[in-house]
Every structure is written in C-alpha cells, then in structure tokens.
Image (spheres, rainbow, N blue to C red):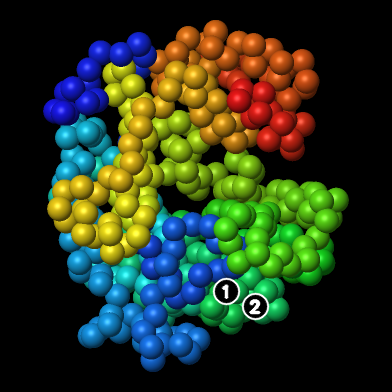
C-alpha cells in the first residue's frame, strides 16, 4: 500500500495543523538491569566484564574490539530507520530530540556526535532545538559530559535516583554516592540546563533520608528535577520479590516534603513529576503531555504521528538484534495502528491532565479531530467532583486540574476512560 493510501486516505477525523514534532531515539543497552525497571533495556556483558564499574573509568563491556557493544551497526540501523520514516514527516521541522535508554551514555561522545549529525542531515531542526540525553553516573568519566556537549547535546538528564549508598544498593544501581556527586558536578559545569532524576518511597526510606537526598540535589541549584515515587511494575525483579517500602500515608507525606523543599528552592511543579526553574521546563516532555507528535526510532521505540484524517501509533522491534536486522532491511516498524475515535479523547486527557497549568481547550479539536462535545460529559463530571476547573484566560478557555485533581490524578483521568 502506498503512503497516500496508508496515511493520507480520507477518514472521519478532521485534524487541524500538525502539532509540534519531536524525535525520540532509544539506545537500549545498560550496565545492569535495575530491579524496578520495566523499560526496554538490555544488559550488555562480556564474560570478563562482571566487575562493577570503577569511578573515573568505564567498565570493559564498552571497550573497543571483540565483543564490544555494536555501536556503529546500531547507528547504521538508526539512520536506516530514520530514512525510511522521512515520508511520514515531510515538510515538518523538529521541535526537540530526546536520546533515552537503556543508558545512552554507554555510547561514546563520537557516536553521539554521529547520531546528532545524522538527525540534522535528514531532518530540519528548529532554531534552539532542545537535544536531551540521559546519562548514568555509573558511566561517568572526567570530561565525558563536556564531550557530549561538544557533540551537540544541549541538555543532560542524569539518573541519580538517590545520593544514599544504601538506597542505591537497594535499587540495584551500579553507581555510588561519590560517582553521583561527581557526575552532577560535571553536568553543572558543562551544561546550561540539566535534569536530575530522583526517586522516593524507596525500600526502608525515612522522611529524614529523603530530606537529605533533596538537600544534596538542591545544593547544586539544578534547573530541573524529576521526582518519581517508586512503583512496583509487573514483570520486574521487584514484582517477583517485592521489597518493603513506605506505606501510602508516608508516601503522601514524602510528596508534601518534595513540594515544600522544591518550592522554597525556586522550582515550580509544572507536571506531576517535574519541577523546573523559569525557562528550564523540558520542551520534549511538554510536547508529549500536550499531545504533540513524536517519531520514535531505535529498539522498542514508540511513536505517535498525526495526519489530516487519522492519528497513528508505531512500535519498533524490541530486541536490539532483531531491530538492527529489520531496520537495515527497511522494516524497523514491528507494529502500527490507528488510534480509534473512541480512544482519542482518553489518550488526549490522559496526557494533558498531567500539566499543572492544564491545556487550551481549542487544542482538543485541533489534535484529535473530534468536537469538544466528545468530552463534555467527562468535563462536567470532573467539575462536579471538584477535580477539574474550566477557566477563561487571555489565551482562551483552559481545562486544568484543581489542586485536588492534581493530587488524585488517576481518579480524574479515569473519568475520561
């Protein structure tokens, strides 16, 4: 079936102008699979590389030579994937790029430079395009982050999770406190903007221990913090052998502490898990939450693309070896489907209600192709329950969660299911 028949044929939806376009790139390998992780990540190990990484030196699993991670072949596959995807995004410029994993910082700065160069060659990028890359303190080497900056990365997101050695060990992380401190120090010196990922409600964690983690993180004056409540996900090591974690009441008290300490430090909570200083909100994640489009390339990457009469979701082959083989053959997509008219309202609200400031009501019709009447009943029910408010602003009508709706977000989202 031709591109026109597949994506541009007539349909019942009438979407407006295409939303902003982002690109997500998945680099799937990591040093060690964390017991709480349900992402598409794959340990890369050589027989002689069983030792833990040493501060200041990458482990032998990423050394050049026999048995090394297939960086160049994977980059070839990414380029082939991107080239095959170009007809779906003709004429559209890229708003942001996010290089996630896995542990992207296992890839050398030279490889990241090649990846960004390929993206720039094949896709027009908007001026000031945000290019974020995830990094693990366990892959930290002196000057490595500066080299990523020189390669074209504009924003680093560091997976610290905790500065407490006992908690890091409980989470199965490969780095320790000293490596985390060194990595954050280097990021602060190398980048104008960066993010720290922290987790709370960890096994055995007290409120005082969380406060110490937050004090340490805030001592670096980070432009952006992402703070996640530890969740036991299905099909993870923690699901098979659950650790003892703080109860719900303590978890709620911990979130209150997070809100207090980040607010006092000048960070604004703009999304359920995201806190930023003015001018440092994550453009890439905002595009997700505003139901924008994103092209996902790499093993297991998900994407969402809008056309005049339909919204399409895609998934790439999950296993890295299968992905490289299929992408190099021009068949990177393993699954694709149109989002149904019935599912679109929930998908839109599921994402946009995560934003503290809410969403312009006009974007609903523009990005789903459906009239506002499709969610009118849900909006009224959410208002009646005190979970949502409809406000008139200089930008027009806005739907946004109330303070109660933000605290009980899943209850609010379920109304639109």
Figure quadrant of residue 227: bottom right
* Residue holding disc 2: 169
Q: Position of residue 76 (x, y in %)?
A: 18, 61
In which quadrant will I find the C terminus? top right
In which quadrant will I find the N terminus? top left
Q: Secondary structure at mark 2?
A: helix
Residue occupying the point 82% across, 66% down: 206
Q: Position of residue 220 (x, y in %)?
A: 59, 66
Q: Are marks 1 and 2 in contact (CB under 8 Å)?
A: yes
Q: Position of residue 146 (x, y in %)?
A: 36, 71
User: Left or right of 112: which side holds 256?
Assistant: right
Residue occupying the point 29% across, 18% down: 308
Q: Residues within 10 Å of mark 1 (few under 14, many from 20)?
A: many
Up-down: is 312 above or below 295?
above
Looking at the picture, tell me which residue is in the foreground, 249 or 67: 67
Looking at the picture, tell me which residue is in the foreground, 174 or 98: 174
- Examine the rendering and report whether any part of residue 120 can be seen: no
* Residue holding disc 1: 173
Residue occupying the point 22% across, 33% down: 88
User: Left or right of 389: which side holds 108?
Assistant: left
Q: Residues within 10 Å of mark 2 (few under 14, many from 20)?
A: few
How many labels sit on residues? 2
């Amino acid at each position: 079936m031709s591109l026109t028949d597949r994506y541009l044929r007539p349909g019942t939806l009438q979407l407006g102008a295409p939303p902003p376009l982002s690109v997500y790139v998945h680099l799937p390998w990591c040093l060690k699979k964390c017991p709480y992780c349900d992402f598409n990540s794959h340990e890369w190990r050589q027989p002689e590389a069983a030792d833990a990484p040493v501060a200041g030196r990458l482990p032998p699993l990423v050394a050049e030579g026999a048995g090394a991670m297939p960086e160049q072949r994977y980059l070839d596959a990414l380029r082939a994937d991107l080239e095959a995807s170009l007809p779906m995004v003709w004429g559209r410029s890229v708003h942001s790029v996010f290089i996630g994993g896995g542990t992207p910082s296992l890839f050398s700065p030279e490889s990241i430079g090649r990846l960004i160069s390929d993206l720039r060659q094949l896709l027009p990028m908007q001026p000031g395009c945000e290019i974020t890359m995830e990094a693990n303190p366990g892959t930290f080497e002196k000057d490595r982050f500066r080299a990523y900056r020189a390669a074209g990365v504009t924003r680093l997101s560091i997976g610290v999770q905790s500065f407490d050695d006992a908690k890091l060990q409980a989470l199965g992380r490969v780095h320790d406190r000293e490596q985390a401190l060194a990595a954050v120090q280097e990021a602060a010196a190398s980048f104008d903007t960066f993010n720290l990922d922290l987790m709370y409600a960890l096994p055995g964690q007290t409120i005082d221990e969380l406060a110490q983690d937050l004090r340490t993180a805030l001592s670096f004056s980070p432009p952006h913090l992402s703070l996640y409540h530890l969740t036991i996900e299905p099909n993870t090591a923690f699901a098979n052998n659950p650790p003892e974690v703080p109860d719900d009441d303590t978890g709620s008290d911990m979130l209150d502490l997070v809100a207090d300490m980040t607010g006092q430090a000048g960070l604004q909570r703009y999304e359920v898990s995201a806190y930023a200083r003015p001018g440092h909100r994550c453009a890439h994640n905002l595009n997700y939450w505003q139901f924008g489009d994103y092209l996902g390339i790499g093993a297991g990457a998900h994407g969402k693309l809008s056309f005049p009469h339909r919204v399409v979701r895609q998934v790439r082959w999950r296993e890295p070896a299968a992905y490289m083989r299929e992408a190099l053959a021009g068949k990177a997509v393993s699954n694709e489907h149109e989002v149904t008219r019935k599912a679109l309202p929930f998908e839109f609200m599921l994402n946009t209600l995560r934003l503290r400031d809410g969403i312009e009501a006009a974007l609903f019709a523009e990005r789903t192709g459906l009239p506002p009447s499709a969610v009118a009943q849900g909006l009224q029910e959410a208002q009646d329950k005190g979970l949502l408010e409809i406000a008139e602003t200089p930008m027009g009508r806005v739907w946004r969660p109330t303070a109660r709706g933000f605290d009980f977000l899943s209850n609010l989202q379920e109304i639109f299911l």
